[in-house]
C-alpha cells in the first residue's frame, strides 16, 4: 500500500517551522546584519565590509580571539585525556563504583551559575584552595586566583574542565564497554601483556570516541561564555574576555548589533573549519548509519 | 605461598583504587562541601578567617531562612520547571515526529532535509542569538515562557537520536498495522513510539539538563524578574549581595537541590542514557 504523498512532510512540519524561524532564517539575517550598522533603534544601514575592517583593527577583538585560543589549547587536551583515566577507573568492577560514577557526574548536571559561584568561593584569597596549597607547601603566599591577570583565565579554565570531565568520562566509559571482551581473552591467549593490550586493543578501539570528545570539547571551548560572565565578567583588564563574551557585550550591552554579528560570523567560520576537519575524520562513519 | 602473594596484590590494588576514587571524588564534590559549610555558619563566625575552618562552630539554618526572604526561590523554581518541562516535551515530540519519515519513509528531498537538519549542529547559537533576539521581540516573546522555550525545541541531536531508534525497528510491524487499516500517524503513535522509549528517555534527560541550566538565552530574552529562572535569579543574588557570602552560599545550595534530587532519583537513567547518547550520537 502506498502512503499519501504529503504524509512525510506533515510529520516534518513542526520541526521544520522551528528550525526555519530560529536557525535558518536567523542565519541568513545574521550574515546580512554583519554588513550593516544596526542598533535596533534606527533602521539597519548597509556599510559593506566596514564591521569586519573595524573588527580586524580592534585590539579588543584580537585580545578576545587570543584568549579564546588560549582557552582552547588549555581545555581541550585536558578534557580529551583526563576523562580516559577516569573512565578506566570507574570501569573497575568493585563495590560502590556506582556511587563514584554518580559523584563524578554531579558537576555535569548543575548549572554553570552554581558552578561559578561555588568556585568563586573556593578561589578566594583566604579560601580553601589557597589554604590547601599553602598547607602542603606548594605556594608561599595566597594567590588571588580570579583577580590577578596572570591566573584568572587558568582558574576559569579549571572550572570548565571540572564541569566537563564527568560528561566525557561517560562517553569513554561507553567506548570501553563497547570493546568485545573476547579481544582481550584472545590477546591473553596469544601471550600479550597488559601494556600490549592497552596499546593494541584499548587505544585503537577507543579512537572514534577520542575524536568525538575532541570535536565536542573544541566546539564547546570556542563558545565559552557562562563561566566567564559569572566568575570574572571578562576581567581583570579583559584578561578573560573571550570571543563569545565580546560578541555578547557588543550586542546586548552596547547594541552594536551589526558589529557583533560580524564577530558571530567569524566565530561561525572558525567552528565550521573545525567541524569540517572533524568530518574528514569521521564523516564517513556518521552518514552511513 | 603463591596464593597469599596474589591475595596481597589484589588487596593492594583495591586500596590503591579506592584511594584514587576518593581523591577524585574530593575534587569533584569537595567544592560543594566547602560551600555548604559556609552556608551553615552562624553570623557570629568569621567566614573569611585564615586558616579557614571547614566545620561550622554553631551550625544554623538561618542563612537559608534569610535567603528565602530576599530570593523568591519558589517563583524561580516554578519558572525553571515550566521552561524545562515545556522544552523537554516539545523537543521530544517534534524530534520524534521529524525522525519518523526520515527513518522509515521514502520521499522526495529526504536526504537533503536530513543533511539540512544535521548542518544546524555547525551553526553556533552565539551567532544566531542576535537575530533570534530581534525576531523574538517582533513575535512578542520577550519575558514569556514560550520565548525561552521555542528556540530549543528541535535539535539535530534529537532528530538524529530518534531516527537511529526508529531505524532499528523491523518494517513488518508497520506493514501489518497498515494491513489492519492504521494510518501513518497511528502507526507512529501506537506502535513505534512505545518501542523507542529508551531513546526518548535519553533525549528527555539531555534536554532537561540543558534547559534547566540554560543561562545565556534567558539572560537575553528575559528582563522581568518575575520571569527569572533559577540560574538568572541566583546570578542576580550573587551580584546584589556581593559581600554576604553566607547568603550567596545558601542561595546556591538551594538552587542546586532540585536538579541534584532529580539526578539522584534517576541516576541510573542519566548514566546509561548518556552512554547511549555517546554511542549513537
Image: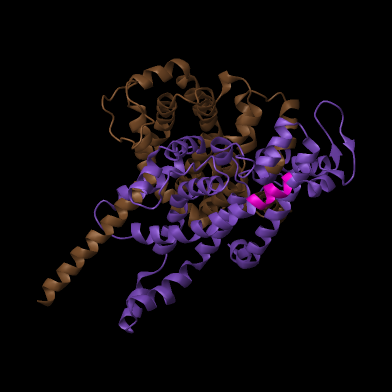
Chain colours: A purple, B brown
Horizontal side, residue A285 vs residue B39: left or right? right
Image quadrant for the C terminus of chain B? Answer: bottom right
Please tell me which residue is depicted at 44% across the width and 15% down the height of the picture: B69
Q: Which residues are magenta?
A: A60-67
Please tell me which residue is depicted at 52% across the width and 41% down the height of the picture: A146
Q: Eyeballing the image, is A134 above or below B260? A: below
Horizontal side, residue B144 vs residue B75: left or right? right
Horizontal side, residue B122 vs residue A211: left or right? right
Please tell me which residue is depicted at 56% across the width and 54% down the height of the picture: A217
Figure disc tally: 0
Horizontal side, residue A90 vs residue A83: left or right? left
Secondary structure predominantly adopted by residues drawn in magenta: helix
Depth check: B27 or A89 in front?
B27
Residue A205 magenta-highlighted: no
Give residue B8's position: percent from left, percent from top: 16, 68
Depth check: B173 or A124 in front?
A124
Amino acid at each position: 500500500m502506498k502512503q499519501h504523498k504529503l504524509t512525510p512532510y506533515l510529520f516534518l512540519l513542526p520541526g521544520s517551522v522551528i528550525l526555519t524561524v530560529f536557525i535558518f532564517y536567523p542565519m541568513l539575517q545574521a550574515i546580512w546584519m554583519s554588513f550593516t550598522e544596526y542598533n535596533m533603534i534606527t533602521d539597519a544601514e548597509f556599510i559593506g565590509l566596514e564591521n569586519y575592517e573595524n573588527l580586524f583593527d580592534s585590539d579588543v577583538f584580537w585580545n578576545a580571539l587570543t584568549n579564546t585560543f588560549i582557552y582552547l589549547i588549555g581545555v581541550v587536551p585536558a578534557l580529551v585525556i583526563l576523562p580516559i583515566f577516569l573512565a578506566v577507573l570507574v570501569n573497575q568492577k568493585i563495590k560502590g563504583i556506582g556511587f563514584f560514577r554518580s559523584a563524578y557526574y554531579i558537576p555535569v548536571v548543575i548549572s554553570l551559575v552554581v558552578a561559578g559561584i561555588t568556585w568563586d568561593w573556593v578561589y578566594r584569597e583566604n579560601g580553601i584552595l589557597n589554604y590547601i596549597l599553602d598547607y602542603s607547601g606548594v605556594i608561599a603566599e595566597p594567590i588571588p586566583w580570579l583577580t590577578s591577570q596572570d591566573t584568572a583565565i587558568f582558574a576559569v579554565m579549571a572550572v570548565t574542565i571540572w564541569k566537563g570531565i564527568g560528561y566525557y568520562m561517560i562517553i569513554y566509559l561507553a567506548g570501553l564497554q563497547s570493546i568485545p571482551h573476547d579481544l582481550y581473552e584472545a590477546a591473553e591467549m596469544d601471550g600479550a601483556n597488559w601494556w600490549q593490550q592497552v596499546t593494541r586493543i584499548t587505544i585503537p578501539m577507543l579512537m572514534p570516541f577520542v575524536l568525538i570528545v575532541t570535536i565536542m570539547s573544541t566546539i564547546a571551548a570556542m563558545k565559552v561564555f557562562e563561566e566567564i560572565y559569572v566568575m570574572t565578567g571578562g576581567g581583570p583588564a579583559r584578561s578573560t574576555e573571550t570571543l563569545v563574551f565580546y560578541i555578547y557585550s557588543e550586542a546586548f550591552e552596547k547594541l552594536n548589533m551589526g558589529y557583533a554579528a560580524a564577530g558571530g560570523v567569524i566565530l561561525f567560520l572558525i567552528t565550521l573549519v573545525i567541524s569540517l576537519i572533524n568530518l574528514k575524520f569521521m564523516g564517513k562513519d556518521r552518514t552511513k548509519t | 605461598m603463591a596464593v597469599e602473594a596474589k591475595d596481597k596484590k589484589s588487596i593492594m590494588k583495591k586500596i590503591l583504587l579506592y584511594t584514587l576514587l576518593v581523591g577524585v571524588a574530593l575534587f569533584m564534590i569537595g567544592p560543594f562541601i566547602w560551600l555548604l559549610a559556609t552556608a551553615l555558619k552562624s553570623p557570629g563566625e568569621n567566614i573569611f578567617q585564615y586558616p579557614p575552618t571547614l566545620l561550622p562552630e554553631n551550625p544554623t539554618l538561618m542563612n537559608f531562612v534569610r535567603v528565602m526572604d530576599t530570593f523568591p526561590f519558589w517563583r524561580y523554581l516554578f519558572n525553571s520547571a515550566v521552561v524545562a518541562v515545556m522544552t523537554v516535551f516539545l523537543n521530544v515530540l517534534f524530534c520524534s515526529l521529524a525522525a519518523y519519515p526520515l527513518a522509515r519513509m521514502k520521499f522526495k528531498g529526504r536526504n537533503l532535509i536530513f543533511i539540512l537538519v544535521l548542518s544546524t549542529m555547525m551553526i553556533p547559537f552565539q551567532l544566531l542569538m542576535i537575530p533570534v533576539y530581534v525576531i523574538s521581540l517582533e513575535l512578542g516573546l520577550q519575558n514569556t515562557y514560550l520565548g525561552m522555550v521555542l528556540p530549543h525545541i528541535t535539535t539535530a541531536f534529537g532528530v538524529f537520536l530518534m531516527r537511529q531508534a526508529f531505524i532499528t525497528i523491523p518494517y513488518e510491524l508497520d506493514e501489518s498495522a497498515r494491513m489492519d487499516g492504521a494510518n501513518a500517524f497511528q502507526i507512529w503513535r501506537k506502535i513505534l513510539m512505545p518501542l523507542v522509549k529508551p531513546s526518548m528517555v535519553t533525549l528527555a534527560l539531555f534536554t532537561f539538563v540543558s534547559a534547566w541550566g540554560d543561562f545565556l538565552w534567558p539572560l537575553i530574552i528575559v528582563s522581568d524578574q518575575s520571569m527569572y529562572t533559577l540560574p538568572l535569579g541566583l546570578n542576580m543574588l550573587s551580584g546584589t549581595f556581593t559581600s554576604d557570602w553566607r547568603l550567596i552560599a545558601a542561595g546556591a545550595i538551594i538552587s542546586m537541590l532540585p536538579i541534584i534530587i532529580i539526578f539522584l532519583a534517576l541516576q541510573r537513567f542519566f548514566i546509561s542514557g548518556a552512554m547511549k547518547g555517546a554511542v549513537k550520537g
